[in-house]
Amino acid sequence: MSQHIVSPKIYFLIFAALFALTALTTGVAFIDLGPYNTVAALAVAVTKAILVILFFMHVRYSPHLTRIVVAAGFFWLAILITLTLSDFRTRSWTPRPSGWEISAFSPQDGR
Amino acid sequence: MSTAPAEISVEPRVHYLNVDYGIKSWLLTTDHKRIAMLYLASITFMFVIGGAFAVIMRLHLIEPTGALVEPETYNKLFTMHGIIMIFFFLIPSIPAVLGNFLVPLMIGARDLAFPRINLLSWYIYVVGAAFTMYAVVSGGVDTGWTFYTPYSSTYANTHVMATALGVFITGFSSILTGLNFIVTIHKMRAPGMTWFRMPLFLWAIYATSMIMILGTPVLAITIVLLALERLLHVGIFDPNLGGDPLLFQHMFWFYSHPAVYIMILLGMGVVSELVTCFSKKRIFGYSFVAFSSVSIAVLSFLVWGHHMFVTGQSIYAGLVFSLLSFLVAIPSAIKVFNWTATLYKGSVSYQAPMLYAMGFIGLFTMGGLTGLFLASLATDVHLNGTYFIVAHFHYIMVGSAVMAYLGGIHFWWPKITGRLYPDTWARFAALVIFIGFNLTFFPQFMLGYLGMPRRYAFYPQEFQVLNVMSSAGASILAVGYLIPLVYLFWSMRYGPVASSNPWGAKGLEWQTSSPPPTDNFEETPVVTEGAYAYSSEEAPVV
Amino acid sequence: MSEAPLALAHQFDDLDQQHEAGSLGMWVFLVTEIMFFGGLFAGYTIYRSLYLEGFVAGSHILNIKLGATNTAVLIASSFTMAMAVHSAQKGRRRAVMGFLLLTMLLGFTFLGIKCVEYHDKYVEHLIPCESVACSNLGLQFAPVEQALQEIQKQHAQLAHVELYFCFYFFMTGMHALHMIIGIGIMTYLLLMARRGKFNAQYYAPIEVAGLYWHFVDIVWIFLFPLLYLIGGRY
Amino acid sequence: MPWWSGFPIHPERGSTIAEGVDHLHYFLTAITLIFTAIIFATIFYFAVKYRRQSENDKPPHIAGSLTLEILWTLIPTLLAFVTFVWSASLYFRNSRPPEAALEIFVIGKQWMWQLQHPEGPREINELHVPVGQPIKLTMISQDVIHDFYVPAFRVKKDVLPGRYSSIWFQATKTGKYHFFCAQYCGAQHAGMIGWVYVMTPVDYEEWLSGGVKGESMAQAGGRLFGQLGCITCHMPDGTGRGPSLEGLFGKPVQLQDGRTVPADEAYLREHILNPRALTVKGYPPIMPTFQGQVSEEQVLQLIAFVKSLGTEERKPAKP
């Protein structure tokens, strides 16, 4: 399992990559990309997290069980966020006999 | 009916109970069997307190204007009854008592993966119980076990913080127990014990541990946010900050619905063991029952919205949650059919554990199907917040989970204490509980359909007759629960000595002596056949 | 180095089984931590989608330089922790102690920078607390000059910015608490390492502590963009 | 009076949707009783037929049968799906109030209900409605979450603080029906109940005119509109700094950041209490917030006034 010893060179490489990604995400924040700012910030954060999980936490060399456990953790978090968000985002949908009439906004009911 | 086992001369054999005496040997033990006994004592104490609150409430509701207590006290009674029964009895009962005792025995291990963490989780449970008991003694809390904001965060002036802290701490006890079970089942199975040779009780334990691991932390963070909102007078559920009380309900029910499956899944696990042993037959459709346990655990995380159909959740989300709630009922139906099919061509005996198992199957069918009323949107609008809901979840929690727990306690009692209990008394108690239970909670279905809201300290006149019937049933049920307490304690000293396998059951725990030695097995057993191999020709010599 | 008998617990058959059980146990615990922080992230996501301009205003009030340096500090501490595990695998006792000390040092730096940020919020009256006790301590939410202009620039409502700061303090506070626990664990490991408890065969406690520390780093990796970089600074 | 006479089995059906909900309820009751009976009977039959003859019986080894498993997976799934479609469509239809519904405002506060008719009369824990006329209740709470529940009409909805929620019903039978608070709200939660009096339209008109004739909500709203100084910006001819509110209710409004939203009650309430988040296109965000200066009831009166501006003919048609 984690008997596999990772050479310090790879550790240093990963450290450098993480450092660069941090600088990147901070720099990108100062450029106006409209809605893509958030997408970019999240994409960088996810890559950094994957790097830490695979190399620093040795998941790359661990048996499948550990990978399933990690995936299950993030999947359940996704369940909580998506199903709750589905309620908040569809509150302003009022049912019409012909189907949904999706009004762009009804303030307190959540945009 | 059951022939008394041949009298075995009791030579002073060292086992986990008489290996050491004294308070220190109990309070500092890391033996999973002793920790199970510590849990048994503490949750029975909590069950008695919770039960007392229930009896007072039922007596109070005999009169439409309320016969016994003030409305404020009644609100505290139903809140404390809910909190104690759910967080301090039902959730720890089967996993911490039967699970702790049996998991290492059933997979042929010497102990759980982390014995010290196991003892730590008992201490965490006791500290949590202490906080809640402090709240009970010094005035109680009246927010309902659901702690809905903004009442619990701004308007309630009772001991919400102490109870919330108690529930928060006890949550970690069930997280650590779940963690222990998952690692033990994965890493410490005896040679030859593949996943599909494991008893179904262990499948249920595994599925329940998944729920404990994935659900309880969300309850913990929700309670921390509630406590912070009460402390700082500002928080994310506060309407005048633009916060939404529904977010609290979403995060609360994300844990609390799977929590009801923690209670029932293990009841199913116990019943799978009882039905197979007392009909001397292999379970019908082993892999279907095993996979339905795991699929219940997974699906239970997708359905919590059916608690919020009328609380202002969006109609679209209501449709999604309603469909998912119907799907979660399917695996439970599969299990019930498989248990019933197991009896076919078996050799059925009616000892007390089997009576509890059969009672479980019937009442669980009733409880489960009344859940369909609440999963379907149109009827839930009428029935939400009425006594129909109270009846539904009592059929599941009391009618099924507690019955299965009692069945399990009776079935493994010889293994736990090395003594047999008086079976005629046990069957009588099972019957009294069955009758008392139905008389208490069936009228509440009708009360709910008539529209009597729950959590009412006084109610209109026309609901009185059904309430009186329910209170009558409650007194029978209370008596029914006291009888086992008496004869089980009696049997610890005076019961006939039990052989290592009094029921002729299959399973590794019946191959070691009862009560088992501290290290469970003389030498680690090797498993050669599937679970419940009752009818294979070369039945291993017991 | 003969197998250290004292290290093998009686319920395990061999050291490998014990090691795998330890790692799996920590990973399952980290899943509970994911769900624990997950509750906060879920609340954050929902309110960000409902009151975006309040969150943008709140995020622009934060000091992005301190946030970025903190991220770099934490990544460095992750690196030194990984090196500590590596040297434990090689059985080099002095290297293990050195790297553990370095990781704790970086951890304290992170907490120091965090205190500076919290102090700035205290001075700018951005503490989300409405209770009487808080106002006696001078903790209240009444943004002034620079923060107020930012809020008006974004057309945000004061209540929504206060909601944002609720999340800011709850999330970074919970993360800081986990940092303090991590540093506590490492001091204990430092003492055990000094007493030579670990060798090339038995180093599980260090590896498990490493997993915990990397998890705390991952939480911050997500916290930094979500709290500091909302909507971009232009 | 014999004890069993006060022992109703079946709640009254007082509204148009009660019929449909009851049919679904009986369908589900039938399923529950049939399946429970099947299970109990099978267990009882097997338990007796295959009772243990001797201790060393050797029952056959039956591992299971795939066909049976598939059978008792498909049938429950089918039943579940049928019930889901039936109940979802019923719920979908019941959730939309008809256009010409008479609107009544409900304010829940700790342990009493205040019901406000647009024509002016205000009732505590009582609601007088004409039979046969669809009624829409727009509800809000002043403190904790309450829940307006009329068992005879099969309607229930939580009443939330800070947000309007609405239900509708059309009474079919005159008479007196209970309404309850069905969401726990504190000490006197059980006391927050009252009566819905369904009357013939003639009696309703007589009650409406006979009762204490305060000014109608629209008139009270108009008075407030002047007192609070709204008139200075929202001039009827649109020459003030704010937009004219003539005929605004129900029409889409263009916001500063490009969104167009319908000007319904929720929009107006949000605009009164938190205006800066909803600056209308072409107008500076200078409207002050009235949070804390107006009670929920006054907000409802202002909204009633705005609705009555320039839409005399669109008043709900008198029966």
Image: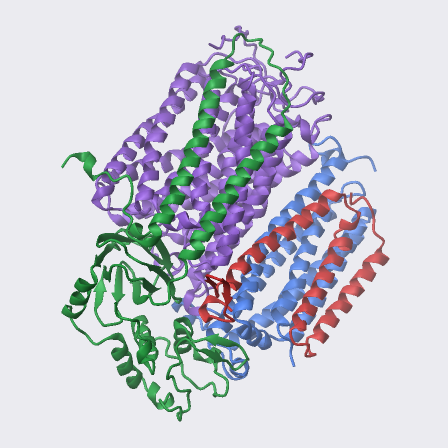
- Name the residue located 29 percent from the left edge and 53 percent from the top edge: D180
Q: Is residue D161 left or right of residue B74?
A: right
In the image, residue D141 lies at what x, y percent?
Answer: 34, 64
Q: Is residue C130 left or right of residue D297?
A: right
Q: Which quarter shows the C terminus of chain B?
A: top right
Q: Residue at image x 36%, y 35%?
A: B51
Count of numbered labels shown in the rendering? 0
Above or below, comparing residue C48 to residue C9 in the picture: below
Residue C29: tell me if it is visible.
Answer: yes
Q: Quadrant of residue D246?
A: bottom left
Q: Position of residue D236 (x, y in %)?
A: 35, 89
Image coords of residue D117 (percent x, y): 25, 68
Q: Quadrant of residue C80?
A: bottom right
Residue B121 place in picture, x, y as percent: 55, 40
Q: Nearer the viewer, residue B81 or B39?
A: B81
User: In this rendering, would B5 be left or right of C221?
Assistant: left
Residue B104, picture quadrant: top right
For residue B5, above or below residue C155: above
Looking at this view, is A26 or D30 the one in front?
D30
For chain A, give the colour. Answer: red
Q: Residue at x 54, y 14 (%)?
A: B347
Q: Which chain is depicted blue?
A: C
User: In terms of depth relative to the viewer, which is nearer, D204 or B317?
Assistant: D204
Chain B: drawing colour: purple
Q: From where the camera sits, is residue B28 visible? A: no
Please state if B227 lies on the left or on the right of C98 as rendered. Answer: left
Chain letter for the green part: D
